[in-house]
């Protein structure tokens, strides 16, 4: 994260004696990245964070790339999927992946988790397409709602509680590298610059600490190496009385992303919202269209020679695409040009604004549809430009 935050009680000096009311020491835990050279936070536990009661048998939790799928422009229709599993983990359906990231959907039936989750394989970026709830983690309570990106650094122990009313649908991205704000929008000390589409005021860290003092049996499912490892601890992992630092989960609403527009068509980098190793995340939000007198609002055909481009369609009409629904993914792959569907370029001329809302993921290594993703393929899409 790009700025310092603290919640609860912490000692004035790190790594010094900090005592509980009964005179015993709080247990300090440094959570640090990049071998003590990246961002970090210091957490103070009531109980020993290593107090493991039992370790269960690991179970596979991974997806397989469909490498025989071939070179095709792809449309995955996921709109009809209402529930894809019972709980938060079994409902995750990863539809595409490479060695840098995975992307998929999650529409769980259960709104409350009866265990904690810890992803030790990667940072998570969760886009709340539908739903409203609370993320409880060691860093406190974070209220989240439709349109939020939730960035959860790896090894954060958390559970979600979603409201029972209304649909619940999440877009899930897991990243091998850290998910960060965009470097070109930061100054030399990390502050977001004037030309950044969002700033620190838009970033919402946990608002209040949530401390659970209870002892008992608390299950944490830890994802590591494509396996789920069940760990049972003798206390709640949310036993934190205070923390400070730069590493914590936070939310940023797509509705707080301020679009950059121009006289002629602006390229996707103006929509960039996050960066990670091997991919970027962009937000397409409601905005005014290009205002040159001869402007063409629809995008031009383009060949991204070294990237695969995924769009997740959240809301609104997409003027350059036909047959796309809310919840659709398109994957426009490197090696083939892509562009507007026939008729949509002329139709776009004169349009003043768009209400579209979409999340884009561009990878720099080839991205594979998973065997799970094959269930959602629209077979007509590769030929849908035929005139
Ligand atoms: Fe594109």
Image (cartoon, grey):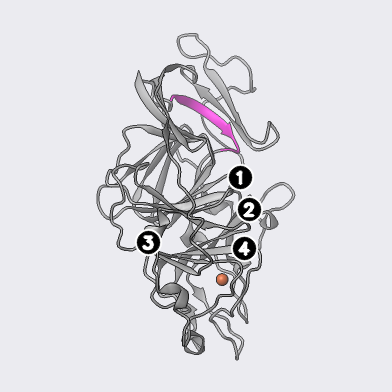
Label 2 close to label 1 by CB (< 8 Å): yes
- Is the stretch drawn in magenta largely helix, strand or loop? strand
Is 362 rendered above or below residue 14? below
Residue 169 is covered by the magenta coloring: no
Label ID, residue 75: none
Give the mark, 1 or 3, whose residue is nearer the N terminus.
1
Q: Mark 4 points at which residue?
A: 307
Q: Mark 2 points at which residue?
A: 278
- State which mark lies toward you, 1 or 3: 3
Give the residue displayed 60% in from the left and 78% down from the top: 265
Give the residue displayed 51% in from the left and 80% down from the top: 340
Q: In what element is the residue under mark 1?
A: loop
Residue 244 is covered by the magenta coloring: yes
Task: State how far apart marks 1 and 4 are (Cα).
Answer: 17 Å
Label ID, residue 177: 1
Q: Name the residue under label 3.
A: 376
- State which mark lies toward you, 1 or 4: 4
Cβ of mark 3 under 8 A from ligand 1: no
Residue 343 position in % (x across, y down)? 47, 88
Label 2 close to label 4 by CB (< 8 Å): no
Q: In what element is the residue under mark 2?
A: loop
């Amino acid at each position: 994260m790009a700025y310092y935050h603290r919640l609860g009680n912490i000692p004035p000096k790190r790594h010094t004696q900090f005592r509980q009311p009964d005179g015993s020491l709080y247990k300090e835990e440094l959570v640090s990245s990049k071998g003590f050279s990246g961002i970090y936070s210091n957490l103070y536990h009531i109980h020993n964070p290593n107090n493991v009661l039992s370790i269960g048998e690991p179970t596979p939790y991974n997806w397989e790339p469909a490498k025989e799928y071939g070179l095709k422009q792809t449309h995955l229709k996921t709109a009809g999927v209402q529930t894809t599993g019972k709980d938060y983990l079994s409902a995750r359906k990863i539809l595409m992946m490479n060695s840098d990231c995975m992307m998929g959907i999650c529409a769980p039936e259960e709104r409350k988790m009866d265990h904690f989750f810890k992803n030790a394989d990667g940072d998570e970026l969760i886009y709340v397409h539908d739903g409203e709830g609370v993320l409880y983690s060691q860093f406190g309570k974070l209220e989240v709602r439709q349109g939020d990106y939730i960035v959860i650094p790896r090894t954060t122990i958390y559970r979600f509680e979603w409201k029972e009313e209304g649909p619940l649908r999440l877009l899930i991205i897991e990243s091998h590298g850290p998910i960060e704000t965009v470097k070109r929008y930061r100054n030399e000390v990390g502050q977001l610059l004037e030309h950044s589409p969002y700033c620190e005021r838009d970033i919402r860290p946990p608002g209040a600490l949530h401390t659970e003092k209870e002892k008992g049996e608390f299950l944490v499912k830890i994802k590591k190496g494509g396996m789920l490892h069940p760990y049972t601890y003798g206390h709640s992992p949310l036993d934190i009385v205070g923390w400070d630092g730069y590493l914590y989960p936070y939310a940023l609403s797509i509705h707080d992303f301020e679009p950059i527009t121009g006289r002629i068509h602006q390229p996707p980098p103006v929509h960039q919202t996050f960066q990670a190793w091997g991919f970027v995340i962009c937000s397409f939000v409601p905005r005014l269209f290009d205002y040159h007198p001869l402007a063409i609002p629809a995008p031009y055909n383009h060949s991204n020679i070294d990237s695969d481009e995924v769009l997740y369609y959240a809301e609104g009409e997409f003027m350059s695409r036909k047959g796309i629904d809310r919840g659709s993914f398109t994957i426009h792959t490197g090696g083939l040009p892509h562009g507007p569907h026939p008729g949509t370029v002329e139709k776009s001329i004169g349009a003043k604004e768009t209400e579209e809302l979409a999340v884009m993921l561009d990878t720099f290594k080839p991205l594979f549809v998973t065997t799970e993703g094959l269930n959602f393929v629209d077979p007509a899409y590769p030929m849908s430009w035929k005139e």
